Each structure stands twice: as C-alpha cells, then as structure tokens.
Image (cartoon, coloured by chain):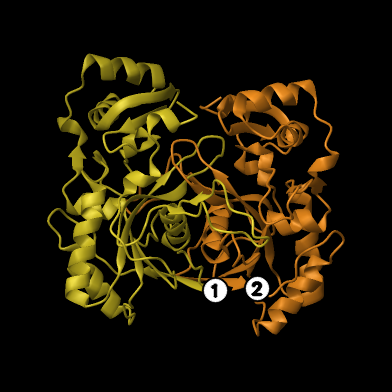
Chain colours: A orange, B yellow
Amino acid sequence: MFVPSNRLEIIGVDGLPEIKEGDDLTRLFLDAVEEGKLELEDGDAIVFTSKIIAKSEGRVVDLSGVRVSGEAERIAKETEKDPRIVQLVLNEAKVIVRMMKNHVIVETKHGFVCANAGVDESNIEEGKAVLLPKDPQESARLLKDEIEERSGKAISVLISDSFGRAFRDGVTGICIGVSGIPALVDRRGEEDRFGKIAQITKEAIADEICAAANLVMGEFKEGVPIAIARGLKLERCERDIQELLFNKEDDLFR
Amino acid sequence: MFVPSNRLEIIGVDGLPEIKEGDDLTRLFLDAVEEGKLELEDGDAIVFTSKIIAKSEGRVVDLSGVRVSGEAERIAKETEKDPRIVQLVLNEAKVIVRMMKNHVIVETKHGFVCANAGVDESNIEEGKAVLLPKDPQESARLLKDEIEERSGKAISVLISDSFGRAFRDGVTGICIGVSGIPALVDRRGEEDRFGKIAQITKEAIADEICAAANLVMGEFKEGVPIAIARGLKLERCERDIQELLFNKEDDLFR
C-alpha cells in the first residue's frame, strides 16, 4: 500500500561532465554524489533526464547527414519546420496524432504521445539533434541494477523528459522509464476518510516524481541532469512504464 | 529569471480538523504549523488541496436536493453515471469536451478541462458531493494575503487538484489557483549550455509544484490537506492561473 511520507527531499546532483557516447553514467553519477558530499540512502528514487541517457547511448544525430523523404518535405512545408527534423520525427514515430504550424505531435515507437517524438535541438552542438533513448524502460532497468550493485543501496531509477500537455500550456516533467517502484499507484478499493470506497483514482506517481525533479533540474545553462527524491514510501517492485500508457480503446482523446 | 534551487523540501502539514463552511483556513493552517513544530520561511510555497478550500467555502451539495434536468437524464443514461452528479457537472461546465461510459470531460466555467468538472464524492459524507472552489484564483490570493499578514513571512499559495490527462493514465496534482509566484515560467530567449537560444520552452511550474505536493498528500484516509514546498527560487509576482490555460485557437486538441 502507498503510505505518503510527511517530508520529501528533492536533491539536485550537479557536477557531471558533458556526456558522450559510451560514458559510464553509473560511475559518473556515483562520483558526483561523492563529490557533492551526498550519500545514497535505501529508498532513494534517482531521476535522470532523458538527454544524458540518450547522449550516453549515442542517440545524437548530425543533421547534415539526414536524407529527407518526400513525406518529410511535405510535412515540413505544412508545419514550417526544418525538413531534417521532420524526417527524424517520422523515423521515431508510430503514428502522427496532430499537426499544425510549428507542431507535429506523434505517438513514438515506445508509445509516448509527445511533440516532435522528443527530438530536441537544445543542449547539443549547433547542427545536431538528440533523440529519445532507444528503450528508456530498459535503460532505467540497467541503471538501477548497476547503481544498486555498485552502491549497495536499494534504490529506484526514473528517466524523465519534459512534455507538453493537451488543454494546458507549458511543459512538465514526465516519466519515460522506471525501475524499482510502480509507475502508477492504483488506489481503487481503498477507503476514504468517511469509509467510502475509492472508485477511480489511480495516481501517476512516476510522473509526479519527475515533475518534482524538474523543479531542481532546470532546462538551460544551469542544467542539473540528475535529481534524487528522498523520503518516498513506495513498494519495491519491478513493473513497467507501459502501465502509464492507455490502451487505445480506453483513450478518450483518440 | 528562474534559478533552480539545488535542494527542495516538500513538507506535509497534517493535524487539521475536518473542514466546515466558514472555517478560517489561515488560522487552522498556522495552528497546524505551530503544533507540528514547523516554522514558515520566506519563499515557502504553500499548497492547499482544492477540497478543503471548497469545504470552507460551502461548496458541498446534498445530492438529495438536486433537481435533474432532461439533458442531465440523457447524459446520465449515455454515460451510466448518477443523474444528480451529471446535473452538478452541467451546472459547473461551460462546454462538454468528451463523453463516454463513466466519463464526462468538460471545460469548467473557470476554463479548466477535467473529468466531471471536478465534482467529487470522495472524502465527504455519503450522499454529498464537493464542487471545485467558486473562484480558486481569488481564493489563492485571499489566503496568500492573510497568511502573509498574520505570519509576517513572504510566501506564495497554490491550490491543487488531481486531474487525469490525455494520452496518459492516472491523475497527477495540478494547479487551479496561484498567488505570489508565476504559474508559467517562460524561458524563450534564454541560452542553453551551448549558447543556443531556447525556442519554445515554457515550464508549467505551478503544476509541477502541485504534482510534487501530491507526493506527500495522499488522497485517502491518511490524507494530508496542505504541503509546503521550500527551497524554490522563484520571482515574487502577482499573475494568474489563466496563463496555464490555452486560448482555444492555440489548443491543438480542440
């Protein structure tokens, strides 16, 4: 059962170098923790931005090498976007959900509905773009196992990105991969303060943790790529980010 | 400018009595802070669940007194919902956005797109339902002014609710009223780590704070109705929750 803690700490972990393909993120993270005189604790939830995961996996594309298809050209014209970026978006997409000027919303091959399939030109050299990690669920699992093995602590790992939302302006931190805790806490069947049984409340706890982490991460120059959420009381388990994604037939908005 | 803090604390404030119409929430909150041996600090962002605001404002409806219109009857049959609840939803709604079995998604008169117009039967006596606060932006402003006056601290107030989202299962904490800090931090024009100018990132900071607060609040028996977020470095300002809501013409999903 989910027992909310009365106090939660979100700690930014800074001091990592610029990440390159092949870098050992576990080692770099544990070094930064040590240098920052932080100490990992059992129960810590460690949130990594998708960008450093993607960079360590070599998911960086040089735009000058992108071959643009006719379809990408047409969409680029319609949306007034860079055709090479549109091509990368199409490569990463299962299906286009919405299009308008400056916006292509797709469902990615992982099943995430987001702008530009997460393809991002910020915080990378001019002329390059960063894709989402190939399999962020698997990346979370590997990182969790490695950090646990090397640190001896029982932790969880979440991979975060910033997505826009329908009906509300602005992006918020959301989760694209989680290992060691649930993504969704199902409270149906629990009693409320008046003994009534909850009917429908499922809480997207992994998204809330990534939103909280965003508050210490920032997105620009001052960017902090990792945050530790300490004080959560969550069941240890091995589930999957898929539990946050709707089956198409349950999705009111498709 | 937004400067992320390196460490953020989210502190649950418990020990409040069941809230009734006319209760002085400022007094009850400050008493609970004192009893909990917490001390308010300048810069604290105080998150109140919409439910206690609504209860203190008398936004509780006895379902036995609801007169059900023909339209509510029809929608109730189509969605298999309680016709009295549907009537309350229609009363609170500007327009219906989507309907299916068990679900009526509307835009409320405030402009929020959410299920059931926020009308909620949990954590209230059997046979009653709680509406959203009448004007949560104004409620946030009043609470902020009162808490500042009585405590002598420069704080901000956010009112939170739990909304579902398009494309992702589960609810997360979101903001429906904010006073003292921005709802949206616009980072367009800031430079990234490579000196490139950010093009589109606006961060829905008020929603992220309410999501973080949800992690210590819980929804059921153990419910904690208020949380303090400490360590945010945000510009003090008086803006409005409206900045999180799209103009209809900018909304890709309508």
Residue at horizontal 74%, vertical 31%? A90
Residue A176, label in figure: none
Q: Quadrant of residue A228?
A: bottom right
Quadrant where the image shows the C terminus of chain A = top right
Say yes or no: labels 1 and 2 on the same chain. no
Residue A43's spot in the image, x, y percent? 63, 70
- Pointers 1 and 2 in contact (CB under 8 A)? yes
Crowding at dot 2, Cα within 10 Å, few <14 / some 14-19 / many 20+, comes out as: some
Q: Quadrant of the N terminus of chain A?
A: bottom right
* Marked residue chain, label 2: A
Give the residue at mark 1. Answer: B6
Residue, x 35% and y 24% (percent of image)? B96
Residue at which label 2 appears: A14
Q: Is residue B195 visible?
A: yes
In the displayed structure image, the side of residue A243 where residue A196 appears, left or right:
left
Q: Quadrant of residue B217?
A: bottom left
Residue A86 place in picture, x, y as percent: 71, 33
Label 1 to label 2: alpha-carbon separation? 8 Å
Q: Amino acid at mark 2?
A: Asp
- On the question of residue A152 being in view, the answer is no
- How many neighbours does mark 1 have within 10 angstroms: few (below 14), some (14-19), or many (20 or more)? some
Residue type indicated by callout 1: Asn
Q: Where A173 sits versus A225, above or below?
A: above
- The subunit letter for the residue under badge 1 reads B
Q: Is residue B211 left or right of residue B134?
A: right
Q: Secondary structure at mark 1?
A: loop
